[in-house]
């Protein structure tokens, strides 16, 4: 190395040494000024203590519990029984994972239109109810999903196929493919359930896996909408992901299928001590109908109804009291054959007092096809007793009063628009939403490029609607005559769009 280079290096090293010494000296002076000592410095550097001379602390842990098992014998047995119940029930509960795909038109920087594919995942719970591997869950867990898989108690992921759906009750039936033997849970009698009795909710909240919560039946006969049968209310913790799991009694029998929670936060719902479950008798009835016929069977009477408000009471001169008014009777229906007329007030159905038209519809739909229903009515200040033979509900019942040309016109318009929808699930209604959700858009239809799967349509030309049937009737009536304005929610944002007239 040349001498000049060595001299340069030596100067640099010397300057660094001077800097370190000066920095260290200043730091020590400031340290001593703040009250430090050499002993503290040695301790910090590890020279001030000898590990080999450390004296262990003396300590004594408690060897006795505060209470003997004999002092809490009842609680001890209860604790063991809780564990035994959980061990018996959990193997029959499954986690359900879903995935759906949809496409969306996007424009790049040059204005070119491209289709992008998106996927979204969901989670829910279910319970095995047959030795063959049939699983009950909620319809809203699997609605519109293209891929469904089930994770069993042992952690095994099993594909599943949809056997049938009951949108009215929010029930779906799946069947596990392969595997087995399966360990089903027995249905209990939900009509024997009492307010205050102890229950356990089992499910897969937030995708965490098997979870058991304990509570009581807080109330019975809770109705969340005009198209939903009465539900159980419970304070057993139910959270997102618990939907479709069982609510069981102390014998491990299914007395309900968990379906919804009440939460004031629409976008981030969380358990507030109020959960709802579909009674097991209704769930079992739906299951058996789906397994036997592929679809649920509902009773049909053939009336249009409205509740009694002060205006209606004055118009009818109907005194205060319960009931619901008939506004129309479908020609050829069981109601017409029984002698029901517009402006009749239905007071009771099979001996049960009617408080609202929603209650009456729920009772009719829950009746067996062919049953003779005893109906008490008020007509022109007199009470009459009628008998109606309940028929089977079908899609054509709602348009039975239309002539063939009207029905053909509606079918042509709806086919041109090309949109498929479903009614809202119970959790969606619990969050305050109203309307229908788009489940499909037919290629090369008027709705293509305008509507998207997942859109929640809540109004047509500013008019609200409550069911999918109402939606289609309003849509067909409007689109046949004019451009149709739709109000909807998409990704949490309000959107308005126009559908062209069907010509």
Image (tube, grey):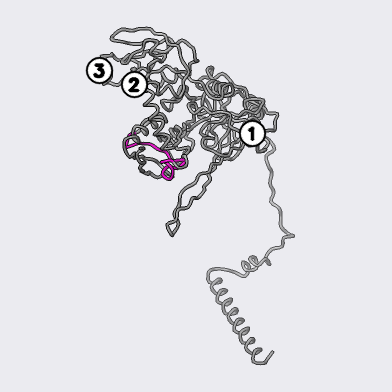
| Crowd class of label 3 (few under 14; some 14 to 19; many from 20; radius 10 Å) | few
Is there any visible trace of residue 80 in the rendered image?
Answer: no
Q: Quadrant of residue 129?
A: top right
Q: Which mark is residue 172?
A: none
- Residue 121, above or below 222: below
Position of the N terminus, as image quadrant, is: bottom right
Q: CA distance from mark 3 to mark 1?
A: 73 Å
| Crowd class of label 1 (few under 14; some 14 to 19; many from 20; radius 10 Å) | few
- Residue 415, above or below 314: below
- Residue marked by disc 3: 315
Whichever of callouts 1 and 2 sits on the residue coming sooner in the sequence is 1
* Image coordinates for residue 356, horizontal then vertical, percent: 37, 20
* Image coordinates for residue 74, horizontal then vertical, percent: 63, 24
- Residue marked by disc 1: 66
* Image coordinates for residue 113, horizontal then vertical, percent: 45, 53
Question: In the image shown, does 94 or 199 lie closer to the viewer?
Answer: 94
- Residue marked by disc 2: 307
- Residue 214, above or below 111: above
Q: Are marks 1 and 2 in contact (CB under 8 Å)?
A: no
Q: Quadrant of residue 15?
A: bottom right
Whichever of callouts 3 and 1 sits on the residue coming sooner in the sequence is 1
Residue stretch rendered in magenta on the structure: 445-463
* Image coordinates for residue 322, horizontal then vertical, percent: 35, 15
Q: Is residue 13 left or right of residue 313?
A: right
């Amino acid at each position: 190395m040349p001498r000049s280079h060595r001299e340069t290096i030596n100067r640099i090293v010397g300057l660094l040494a001077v800097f370190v010494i000066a920095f260290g000296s200043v730091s020590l002076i400031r340290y001593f000024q703040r009250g430090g000592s050499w002993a503290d410095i040695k301790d910090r550097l590890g020279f001030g203590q000898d590990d080999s001379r450390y004296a262990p602390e003396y300590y004594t842990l408690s060897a006795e519990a505060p209470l003997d098992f004999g002092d809490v014998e009842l609680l001890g047995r209860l604790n063991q029984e809780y564990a035994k119940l959980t061990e018996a029930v959990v193997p029959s509960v499954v986690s359900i994972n879903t995935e759906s795909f949809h496409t969306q038109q996007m424009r790049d920087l040059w204005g070119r239109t491209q289709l992008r594919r998106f996927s979204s995942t969901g989670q829910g719970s279910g319970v095995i109810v047959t030795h063959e591997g049939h699983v009950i869950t909620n319809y809203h867990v699997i609605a519109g999903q293209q891929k469904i898989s089930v994770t069993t108690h042992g952690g095994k992921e099993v594909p599943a196929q949809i056997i049938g759906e009951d949108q009215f009750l929010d029930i779906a039936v799946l069947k596990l493919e392969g595997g087995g033997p399966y360990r089903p849970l027995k249905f209990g009698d939900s009509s024997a359930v009492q307010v205050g009795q102890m229950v356990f909710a089992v499910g897969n909240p937030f995708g965490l896996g098997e979870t058991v919560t304990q509570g009581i039946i807080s109330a019975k006969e809770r109705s969340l909408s005009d198209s939903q049968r009465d539900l159980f209310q419970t304070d057993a913790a139910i959270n997102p992901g618990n939907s479709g799991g069982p609510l069981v009694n102390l014998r491990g029998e299914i007395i309900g299928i968990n379906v919804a929670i009440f939460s004031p936060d629409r976008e981030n719902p969380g358990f507030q001590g109020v959960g709802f479950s579909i009674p097991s008798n209704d769930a079992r009835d739906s299951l058996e109908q789906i397994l036997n016929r592929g679809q649920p069977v509902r009773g049909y009477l053939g009336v249009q109804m409205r509740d009694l408000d002060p205006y209606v009471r004055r118009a009818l001169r109907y005194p205060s009291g319960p009931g619901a008014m008939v506004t129309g009777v479908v020609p050829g229906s069981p109601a017409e054959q029984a002698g029901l007329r517009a402006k009749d007030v239905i007071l009771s159905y099979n001996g049960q007092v009617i408080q609202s038209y929603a209650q009456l519809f729920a009772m009719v739909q829950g009746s067996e096809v062919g049953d003779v229903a005893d109906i008490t009515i008020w007509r022109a200040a007199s009470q009459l007793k009628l008998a109606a033979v309940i028929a089977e509900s079908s899609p054509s019942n709602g348009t039975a009063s239309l002539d063939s040309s009207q029905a053909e016109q509606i079918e042509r318009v709806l086919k041109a628009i090309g949109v498929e929808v479903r009614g809202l699930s119970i959790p969606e209604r619990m969050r305050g939403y109203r309307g229908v959700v788009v489940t499909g858009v037919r290629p090369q239809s008027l709705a293509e490029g305008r509507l998207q799967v997942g859109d929640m349509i809540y109004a047509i030309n500013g008019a609200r609607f409550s069911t999918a049937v109402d939606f289609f009737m309003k849509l067909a009536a409007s689109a046949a005559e004019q451009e149709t304005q739709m109000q909807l929610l998409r990704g949490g944002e309000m959107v308005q769009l126009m559908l062209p007239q069907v010509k």
